[in-house]
Image (spheres, rainbow, N blue to C red):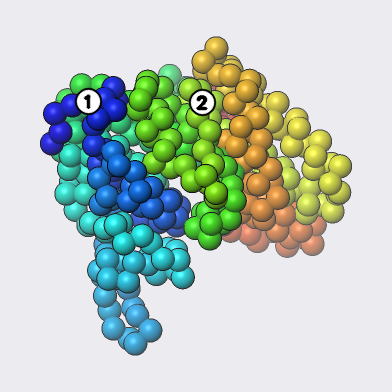
Amino acid sequence: MYESNPQNSADQVERVCIVGSGNWGSAIATIVGANCERLENVTTRVNMWVYEEEIERPDGSIRPLSEIINDEHENVKYLPNVKLPQNIVAVTDVCEACEGATLVIFVLPHQFLPGIIDKIKHVIHPSSRGVSLIKGLDFDEANKLPTLISSNISKWMTSSGGPREFQCGVLMGANVAQNVAMKEVCESTLASSFGQPADEQTRDIFHDEKTFRVQHVEDVAGAEACGALKNVVALGAGFVDGIGLGSNTKAALMRVGLKEMAKFCKIFWGTSVRDSTFFESCGMADLITTCFGGRNRKCAEAFTKIVLAEDHTVSSKNTQDSDEICSIEKYCKR
């Protein structure tokens, strides 16, 4: 454990942990690992919590995924053919992975958060902070209101046995995991209000000047909500493509969609939401990427073509974030 506070001490040595090792978790590990090896105020080793799985190898042998990652420095199941930095260490015990961490990066399906947090809040640094890369929204059934996943993380981490006050920001943007892993140029938005020097130190851990440029904003609510709401607009873009309408129609839908996203955010999170957020990577850029290449758009296009062909068989399992879309419908009916 460290004695000083990483949120207000520039001399504090950071210890970073990535909770999750799927496609996006492994992709961001390529950047975080390289930065932690380079930055002087960060411990070189980065633990990445891996949900253990048995993987069949080309020679017919069966090996644990964590063992393959640590030996071959590649997540052969979720991000094949991409080498991970050697300082990324796969750890199957989430408490061991997070022990003493000053920065916890959450990148896993949000339904697993309560169980994970209940374990790790006892072992992280007392002044630790978090960054969520999870795109989606939760829904408060009692109050019939949308809730931010980052807010729930903060609440659950701060509850009995956790740090005194755990703050959680988000990293959102036009970040297709495979493109990030292949070092294609893109941008992202870090939204946090940790204060200095923690905000800048956190940005440094994610930022790569050549391929992954990160801008900082303080509007956590606006940035995070955009990551969920853009999926609804992307379905509309897919319907447009399926019908066979052109780019003019899609552009109109995206413009109106962006305005509706901003309106939704301001209704539920008020003056904390900034107009400028919607022109960052987390807003307009992510919307563009999802409306042209996202899985929601592709599924909606396929669905529309099937309906037009009078074949009504399509699996809803192909739709990413369908739970969030159903939740958003609840908010709008409220």
Q: Position of residue 323 (x, y in %)?
A: 50, 42
What is the secondary structure assignment of the residue under circle 1?
A: loop
Q: Is residue 81 above or below residue 105?
A: below
Q: Is residue 247 above or below residue 254?
A: below
Give the mark nearest the N terminus, 1 or 2.
1
On residue 163, the disc is none
Q: Is 308 on the left-hand or right-hand side of 47?
A: right
Q: Quadrant of the C terminus?
A: top right
Q: Is residue 228 above or below residue 181?
A: above
Q: Crowdedness of circle 1 by 10 Å Cα count: few (<14), some, many (20+)?
A: some
What is the secondary structure assignment of the residue under circle 2?
A: strand
Q: Position of residue 176 (x, y in %)?
A: 56, 52
Q: Nearer the viewer, mark 1 or mark 2?
A: 1
User: What is the residue that sits farthest to the bottom in this orientation?
Assistant: 59
Of the residues shown, which amino acid type is indicated by label 1? Asn
Q: Which residue is mark 2?
A: 217
Q: Position of residue 276 (x, y in %)?
A: 62, 23
Q: Is residue 184 above or below residue 137?
A: below
Residue at x-position 38% and y-position 61%: 84
Q: Which residue is mark 1?
A: 5
Residue at x-position 81% and y-position 36%: 252
Residue at x-position 58% and y-position 19%: 274
Q: Is 248 on the left-hand or right-hand side of 233?
A: right
Of the residues shown, which amino acid type is indicated by label 2? Val
Residue sitting nearer the eye, 48 or 22: 48
Q: Crowdedness of circle 2 by 10 Å Cα count: few (<14), some, many (20+)?
A: some
Q: Is 252 on the left-hand or right-hand side of 59?
A: right
Q: Position of residue 267 (x, y in %)?
A: 58, 17
